[in-house]
Amino acid sequence: MTDELREKLARIDPMHPGVPTRSVTAGSSRQLLETIMSTGTRERTESSGAPNRTWTLAVAALAALVVAIGGIIALGDGAGETPQAAAIELNAGGEDALASCIQFSPEELARVAELAFEGTVTAVDGPEVTLTVNEWFKGGEPATEVVLNAPLGMEALIGGIAFQVGEQYLISAQDGNVNYCGFSGPSTPEYRAAFETAFGA
């Protein structure tokens, strides 16, 4: 090794030239080397501050589930279901039990009826009669159920109706009152044809 090379190495050597050194063949040097070579190394993993990927995905999935449930609740009790309109209530007690009847005709039916429908009786509970609407001829939509308040004994009046569960009826009404005198009654092919003529069904 030339003197010039020694001088260059000395200039870049970070160790101060006055620091004492020991021979690599000395016993203490060999023991220190043995200790260094036999000591295991450990990798230190420092947190980068970024969230765990698995945890991030779990949180995202939970958020999506909450949004989906909220959407279902906002739409109704079940997915795809549309809330039904409230049932229509009519008085079937007769506005004037002593009033005289006018002759029935499709033209007169069209004149006196504000509501007209065909329905099936699903329940008779004392004076209350519940019908599921099969078809609306005039007004009433989108209601699918009609409740009649029919005092007991009304069937004895002229044109009165004895409602039976499971039977179909054609009902017309005006000012919230069921029309009697042949303007409401059990559904028959001929009677239905008259309703269809009256309302252009």
Image: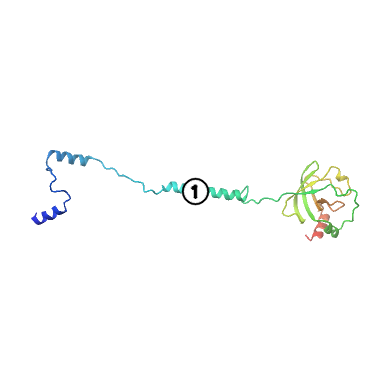
Extreme-bottom residue of the structure: 200
* Position of residue 198 in the picture relative to residue 83 (left or right): right
Q: Which residue is drawn at 44% across and 46% down?
A: 55
* Position of residue 14 in the picture relative to residue 163 (left or right): left
Display coloring? rainbow
* Position of residue 59 in the picture relative to residue 156 (left or right): left
Q: Where is residue 39 in the image (x, y as percent from the top left)?
A: 23, 40
Residue 65 visible at all: yes
What residue sits right under mark 1 in the picture? Answer: 61
Circle 1 SS class: helix
Q: Where is residue 99 in the image (x, y as percent from the top left)?
A: 90, 51
Residues 86 and 198: in front is 86
Q: Where is residue 130 in the image (x, y as percent from the top left)?
A: 76, 46
Q: In which quarter of the image is residue 111?
A: bottom right
Residue 2 visible at all: no
Q: Residue at x 83, y 57 (%)?
A: 194
Q: Quadrant of the N terminus?
A: bottom left
Q: What residue type is labelled 1?
A: Ala
Q: Is residue 44 above or below residue 174?
A: above
